[in-house]
Structures are given as structure tokens and as C-alpha cells.
Image (cartoon, coloured by chain):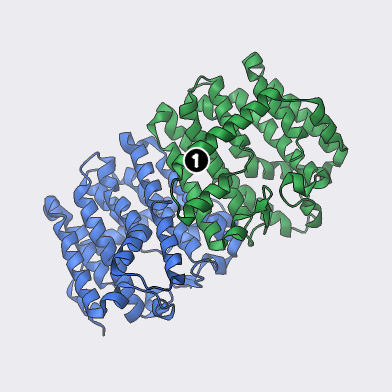
Chain colours: A green, B blue
Amino acid sequence: MSASTVVRQETPAPKFTHALSRTQRLVSARMESALVGDDTLLAAMRYAITGGKMLRGFLVLESARLHEVSDEVALDAALAIECMHAYSLVHDDLPCMDDDDLRRGLPTLHRKWDEAMAVLAGDALQTLSFELLANPKFGDNTLTLIRMLAQASGKDGMVSGQMLDIAAETSPQPLTLEQIILLQRRKTGCLISWSATAGAVIANADTEPLRHYAEALGLAFQIADDILDVEGDAEKVGKRVRKDAEAGKATFVSVLGLDAAKTRAQQLCNQACAALDIYGDRGETLREAARFVISRDS
Amino acid sequence: MSASTVVRQETPAPKFTHALSRTQRLVSARMESALVGDDTLLAAMRYAITGGKMLRGFLVLESARLHEVSDEVALDAALAIECMHAYSLVHDDLPCMDDDDLRRGLPTLHRKWDEAMAVLAGDALQTLSFELLANPKFGDNTLTLIRMLAQASGKDGMVSGQMLDIAAETSPQPLTLEQIILLQRRKTGCLISWSATAGAVIANADTEPLRHYAEALGLAFQIADDILDVEGDAEKVGKRVRKDAEAGKATFVSVLGLDAAKTRAQQLCNQACAALDIYGDRGETLREAARFVISRDS
């Protein structure tokens, strides 16, 4: 039994587990109503969203709850971020990118259909993300919400992180810790920050506590991912493991070592929890999420 | 000399030619300021936009002018639609889609760089399109403008048209005229309609005359494209020609015949011009555009 599994069993997360299942149920139902139809494009789009952990959607719903934004409003933002995340995975899995055959324990979209379908379903999922947000239900800050999502996902955010990742693969020098952190911030951190602050943006409240929480959480999440790549079981994780080491890729584990990476993840978890002090007991579900993230086995 | 070339010489279009050059100059300058930086992703995004006719950007600026929307406001919408169009071309040119090596007389993006760059630059161009529109400068109808663009470009618009196009390639039955028209409406017509009505949407004016104009223009444009594929010169057109016939693809020309296709294009041009009656002489630049579209040789 690995150390991370022990940590997981020592920190049950009943509120988080319940809220995450609830997110998966609500977002899936909303997706079914947003993507009605039997044509192949719609089937492929549904396939790309289905079966995800929906951690980003959970963060949206939870930050909305903390700011008394109704589920009915927040749900479209939660589905929007899950569409954006799903599109990025579908395109990242393509043969010209990471060339992965397995995602969430099932064939990747281009293996289930073909590459053209993966390009198009990914494209349409990105579009749907913005379509869901272009709705007056989000109130006076709707344009801010849309602009922040574009900044988090495009040339200044997720896509630029993916570029850094590709550049690193062919670089003769392994990345430094600072470069790995920058890459992670762009590639996954920006969308996590958008998700965790969305409720505060909609409610026109201070976004700083949730931004600090999300920055620590995002980094902790990536370190946990790197640890899983070393320690995890492909069947549980639902995707190929050991691929970073095989590719000779610099990760938090290769740069810090396994023990220091675990210590760092724990420190970041503590920072994330502390950032929520202002919310008192009401922040407990998000604190459980941070603890879960560093101890998950999939 | 082909019949279409003769028509072109008989109908000079000084206002349109001037407005189109002006669009190219203004949109290119705005693009340079929106995509500052020397990293490869930004270079690839600029490359994808540069050298296009910018017909869609022209339609945005012209419909804005007709409704007294300032160039300064309209220009970001013009760049947004050129980003959306450019992304669609970059992804369509990929080996898994149309597999084209030449675009606007230059190597396609994946030939100049590689497929990963083409996927990512296309993705970031779509994002930039929405980022440019998420701006209060467009006034009370900004969300409508964004939602209409998402509907025109995603699962209910351009991407679904691309899907129909791919499905047609492997279908044992050639498409009927009605199916070709539906495919064209989705694949190119929706973005052209968005462009031509954008100024009216921003000004909160009636969009119907411009919608009728755009529907006829879009169809006429596609028929002209099919004629060019048969009669055109690859060097002038700037992309591969005769590819529809080689692929055994049903086009307006293969279904109607060359002469009837030209007659149909002329009728649609007349319809497009008539739709602008309400604008009187002020609609002349758009009328010239319709005449140009059916007589262009590139």
C-alpha cells in the first residue's frame, strides 16, 4: 500500500464526496438537455464529457454556493467549464499531440471514432462553452466571466501551457522547478482558478481568497498527478501511467524526488485550506476537496 | 478567357475594392496589436489570419457603417470573425480532414509548422474570437452577438456543416441539390450571415434585410467557389483546384451543370442586391460585393 493511499484513508471527505457525486449528476443531466440528438457529432461531444471527475464543475457549484448564487445559474457555468476541459483533453489525446489511446478507462475519442471527429467534437465543445456563458442569467458580470474564461483557456492560458509542454519534450535541457510551475499554471492552473472564482465573479464578491485557494489546489493537483504517474495503477487511474518517466519528462517528482514532492503537496494543501479561513465552516467542503486531491488514487 | 472572367471585367467594383483593401489594412493592424509577441504560437496565429480576402471582416465593417456603428467598435468584431474563419481553415486543412498543402498561395499551417501547432493555433484563434467580443464596447446586445456567433460556428453551424461534408465523402449516394444547400448554409453561410448582420445587432436595428442579403450572398459565393474549382487556375486561386471532381464530390456544378450554376449565381446576386433596397444608395458597396463574389477569379 502506497503512502498516498494511507493518507487517503486517514482523511475521509464525506462533504466533498457527496458534493462531487451531486455535481456529476447535475452536470450530466444538464449536458443531456444541452446536447439532445442522435447525430454522431453530438454523441461524440457527450462521450467526451461523460465519466470525468468533474472537479472543475464542482468548484464552480461550490464557489457559487458560498456566494449564494443559485444552482440553476451556476450549473450552466459548471457545464461550460467541463466542456472546455473536455475539449482540451480530446485535442491533447490526438496522435499529433500526446497520442493517447485510453482516457477515463475508455478509448480516447479519436480511437472510438476517428481523428477528424476528435478535432471537430473538440472544436464544438469549446464553442458550446462560450455559448452557455453568453446568457444574461449570469448578471452584470457575464462579460467578465466570458473574458476571464477566454484568457484562462487561449493563447495566454491553457493553450500556451500546452505549447510549453510540447516545447519541453524536444528541449535538450530538462525543465527547472520554476518552469514546471509556470507550465502547470498555464496548462491546468488557469482553468482551475476560473472554476473556483466563478461564483464570486457572478456574485460580484471578492475573488482573492478563492484565487489563492485555487492556485495552491492547482499546483497540489499537478504534483499528485505526477506522483500517480509514478505510483499509480493504470486500471484505477484510467489512463496510461509511467509515461512521463518513459518520455524522460521533467516532473515535480523527477525534480523534487518522491518524498519532497509529497511534502510539497501537503504544504500546498495546508495553504489552500488556510486561504478559506474567511469562509469559516462553510469552506469545509472545499478544504476536503484539497485534502482529497493530494490523496486520490485515480 | 472564361465567361466568369468576362463578367468580372464588365462589372468594376470601385467602392467594394476600396472598402475591402481598407478592411485588410485595418484588420491586419488590429491583429498585430492583439497578437504581440515573438513566440511560435502567436506567429502561427498571425500567419493563419494574414493574406485572407477578409470578406467576412468587410461585411462586419460595412454593416456597421450602414448603422452608424463606429469603426473602432466594429473593428474588434471584424477581427473576431476573421479569427473564427481562420481557425476553421487551419483545422479543415489538417491531414485528417481535407489534407491540403496550399492555402492563399502559401503552405498550410501544419506544413509550415506541424500538426500539433495547427491544432493549437486553431484552438487559440477560436478562443480569441470570443475574447474580442466579450467587451462592453459592443453595448447592450453584446451577449446576443456572442451567442449568435457560437450558434453560427459550433454544433448547430459551421462544425455541423463540416460534419455533413465529411459524411458526404463516404456516402454511396451523391448529395441532392437540397442537401448541398443545407451543407453550404451550415458550413459557410452561418458565419457570413453573422458578419453581415453584426452591425445591425450592435445598433439594435432590424437584421432582416441584411440576413436576406447574406443568405443569397453566401450561396452565390459557394456556387462561385464550385465554378472556380472547375474553371480556376490554382496559381491565382491560391489553393488546389479540381479537387471536388477528383474526389467525386457533388457540387452545385456537378448537380446543376456549369451554365445553370452560373445562371443561379447571377439570380442569387440579383436577390442579394434587391434585399438592400431599404438602404438605397448607401447599400451600393454591399451590392458591388455581391457582383464581385460571383465574378471573382480567386
Look at 20% across and 65% down and name the residue there. B268
Q: Is residue A260 above or below residue A10?
A: below
Q: Position of residue A4 (x, y in %)?
A: 82, 35
Q: Position of residue A183 (x, y in %)?
A: 68, 45
Q: Is residue B236 left or right of residue A11?
A: left
Residue B18 x %, y %:
26, 61
- B3 relative to A45 in the view: left or right: left
Give the residue number, with chain letter if any, for mark 1.
A31
Quadrant in which residue B185 is drawn: bottom left
Local crowd size for mark 1, using a 10 Å CA cut-off: few (<14), some (14–19), many (≥20): many
Q: What secondary structure is found at the residue carrying circle 1?
A: helix
> Which chain is mark 1 on?
A
Residue B56 in view: yes
Q: Position of residue A291 (x, y in %)?
A: 74, 28
- Name the image quarter holding residue B130: top left
For image coordinates 38% across by 60% down, the residue present is B187
Q: Is residue A58 above or below residue B269?
A: above
In depth, the one of B175 and A3 nearer the eye is B175
Q: Is residue A58 above or below residue B152?
A: above
Who is closer to the viewer here, B201 or B68? Answer: B201
Q: Quadrant of the N terminus of chain A?
A: top right
- Asked if residue B54 can be seen in this view, the reply is no
